[in-house]
Amino acid sequence: MDFLILFLVYLVCVLTSVLLLCIYSKRTHTVAGEILTDGSQVFSRFVPGWLQRTTQRAFHHLFHTRNCIFIILHLALEGAVYSEYTWEIFHYCLELEFSLYHLLLPYLLLIINLFFFFLSCTTNPGVITKSNEASFLQVYDYDEVIFLKNLKCPTCDLRKPARSKHCRVCNRCVHRFDHHCVWVNNCIGALNARYFLIYLLTLIAMAVNIAVITSAFLIHLVLLSGMTLGTYLDDHGQEQPVDIAFLIQGI
Ligand SMILES: [Zn+2]
Ligand SMILES: [Zn+2]
């Protein structure tokens, strides 16, 4: 049951964070925004004022200003996962005669991932300046619906090329703006979108790769130990054959 309790605690923490984030983030004038506004009014009756102000300031700093916190968190999480893999999985898998190439693949993916993570963080996403404004204006046609000709960004005081947008976090206009990513602390735009995409793909590949190796390792352990042939005593003292649910909790 320990695993399930830990998982429930984790789930409660995540859901509470998402709830706080929804309530204290900038609200939009949509139906969802109105619901959140009503929700926050109810919620604020139970939360002390100082905690609301601190949460608001913390979320504003985390998500609406440029900072390296998520880059550090990202590197720390990858470091933790790979430390665990190296010390807990890699050597045991070698002893179980897993293919060395398969076991080294996560490290190769990590190197590629970090390289494109670095590029996503540091590459100019396509910031529009006085010197490149004219060339960006030629790239896409204005549709006169969403993107209007001769529209100026009031902050940057530059004409807005079609498909560009002003990033409120970085306070600059970006060509073919997609979004501002807190994990790379950079806008994702025309010039770094390809790096960001490869970064995401390698991240998914790493997660799948390590999940497959870890699952294969655990299945090997279970089969070698003969646990599937054993029995256990349930809460009522009755002897029960080992089943999948017991194995998942036991592992
Ligand atoms: Zn702007
Ligand atoms: Zn930005």
Image (cartoon, rainbow, N blue to C red):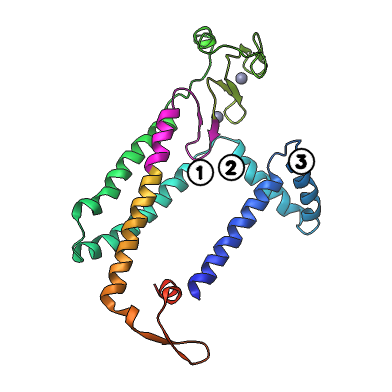
Separation of residues labelled 1 and 3 (CA atoms)? 32 Å
Which residue does the image show at 35% across and 40% down from the upper left?
114
The answer to whether residue 29 is left or right of residue 244 is right
Which residue does the image show at 75% across and 46% down from the upper left?
36
Which residue is labeled 2 in the image?
A: 62
Q: Amino acid at mark 2?
A: Leu
Q: For the residues labelled 1 and 2, say whether their Cβ atoms are less than 8 Å apart.
A: yes
Q: Earlier in the sequence, mark 1 or mark 3?
A: 3
Which residue does the image show at 30% across and 41% down from the upper left?
111
The answer to whether residue 112 is left or right of residue 146 is left
User: Which stretch appears magenta?
Assistant: 179-202
Q: Amino acid at mark 1?
A: Ile
Which residue is labeled 1 in the image?
A: 69
Separation of residues labelled 1 and 2 (CA atoms)? 7 Å
Which residue does the image show at 31% across and 62% down from the upper left?
216
Q: Secondary structure at mark 3?
A: helix
Which image quarter is the C terminus in?
bottom left
